[in-house]
Each structure stands twice: as structure tokens, then as C-alpha cells.
Image (spheres, helix red, strand yellow):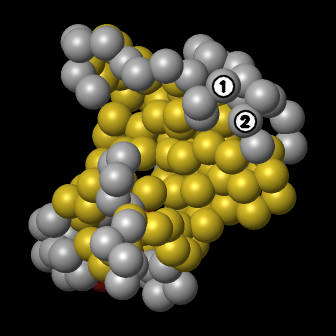
Amino acid sequence: MVLDYCKRVRYFYKKLIFFFIVLLTPLVAIAETISVDDAYVRVSTKFAKSAAAFMEIRNRSSRDDRLLDVKSDEAKKVELHTHIEGDDGVMKMRRVEDGFVISGNGVLKLERGGDHIMFMGLSQPFVDGEVIFLTLIFETAGSIDLEIPIHLKKRSASRSHSHTHTHKKSKTHKHTHTHSD
């Protein structure tokens, strides 16, 4: 009788543990589907009223996701932008209302002359070597908080930098990168 009771209790706890694993698995999977590499912010001078952020966003999931928006207290307006050629042949920056699709197992490159994050009406001067904070908002992966470095000048070849970010429902972690610009 005691043996039967122990078997039932053990069975109950096994089922309970399995249930919690099933519930938590999607949250862990979502938190790890997006990674951000080589992030930096660039302004032309410390007196600039605008700046742009560049980075590579990797979707490690097999399903498409979409970068919907970006938030930051560093400027009055922070928007997703791209360059579009006008009728006159001149490239012009435009806000991207629908966000950027990141295909499954794909990479979105936010880079100069292409898709990027635009800061307009900076709340304070950006100082070379310091960092700013921003939040990327994804359709599926949720929000990712980033701490990224500011560069006033073009980066030289093989310069290292690091950034810290937090995925929704996970711990903050830091990455260091060496790359050329």
C-alpha cells in the first residue's frame, strides 16, 4: 500500500515537472532566437542633432520574424529608416512603417547607405566611446534591450567593441567583437 502511494506521488511529480518544461520551452526558445552583433551608433560631430545605429540582427529560428519598432530615451524620435532612390536619382532616407523582415535563419544588416535606425532630436550630445540604450521590438521574439557604443569617427580596421543586451525573460549578457568598417 505504501509502495503504491509512493509510485502515485512519483508519477504525479514526473507529470508536473514535464508540464512545467513544456510551458517554459517556448519562452526559452523565443529568448534565444534573435542575436545582435557589431552594433554601434554613429554621429558626425558631438553637436549633431541626429545619429544612426547600425548592426547585424540574426534570426536563429527557422520562422520569419519582423523588427517592428525601436525605442530609446536618447532622442525625441527613434525610427526604422531606409534609403530609397527618388525620381531625380537622389537617394533619400525614408521611415519604414512596416518594419524589417528577418527571414528564418537569416540576417538583417542595418548599415550605412541602407536600412538603419535613426535618432532625431538627440536628448544630449553623444560622446565618442560612451554607450546608449535602446530596445528593439520584434513581432515574435518580443523586446531586446541593447547597450551599444557611440563612434564619432569611422572605425579603423580591426577595432574591437562590446555591447550588452538582454533578451525578454533572460539574463543580460555581453559580447565583444573585432571587425573592420
- Would residue 80 be visible to someone looking at this image? yes
Q: Circle 1 — which element?
A: loop
Q: Position of residue 96 (x, y in %)?
A: 49, 79
Quadrant placement of the C terminus: top left
The mark found on residue 165 in the picture is none
Judge by depth and name the residue closer to the eye, 90 or 115.
Answer: 90
Left of 64 or right of it: where is 126? Answer: right
Judge by depth and name the residue closer to the eye, 148 or 170.
Answer: 148
Q: Position of residue 50 (x, y in %)?
A: 69, 46
For disc 2, the neighbor class at 10 Å (few under 14, some 14 to 19, many from 20) is some
Left of 156 or right of it: where is 93? Answer: right
Query: What is the three-letter code of the residue carrying label 2?
Result: Ala
Q: How many marks?
A: 2
Q: Circle 2 — which element?
A: loop
- Residue where numbered disc 2 is placed: 48
Q: Position of residue 43 (x, y in %)?
A: 60, 33
The mark found on residue 45 in the picture is 1
Q: Residue at x 49, y 67 (%)?
A: 93
Question: Where 114 falls versus 41 (above or below)?
Answer: below
Q: Residue at x 37, y 18 (%)?
A: 155
Query: What is the three-letter code of the residue carrying label 1?
Result: Thr
- Would residue 172 be visible to someone looking at this image? no
Whether tag 1 and tag 2 are in contact, CB under 8 A, the answer is yes
How much space separates mark 1 and mark 2, taking CA atoms? 5 Å
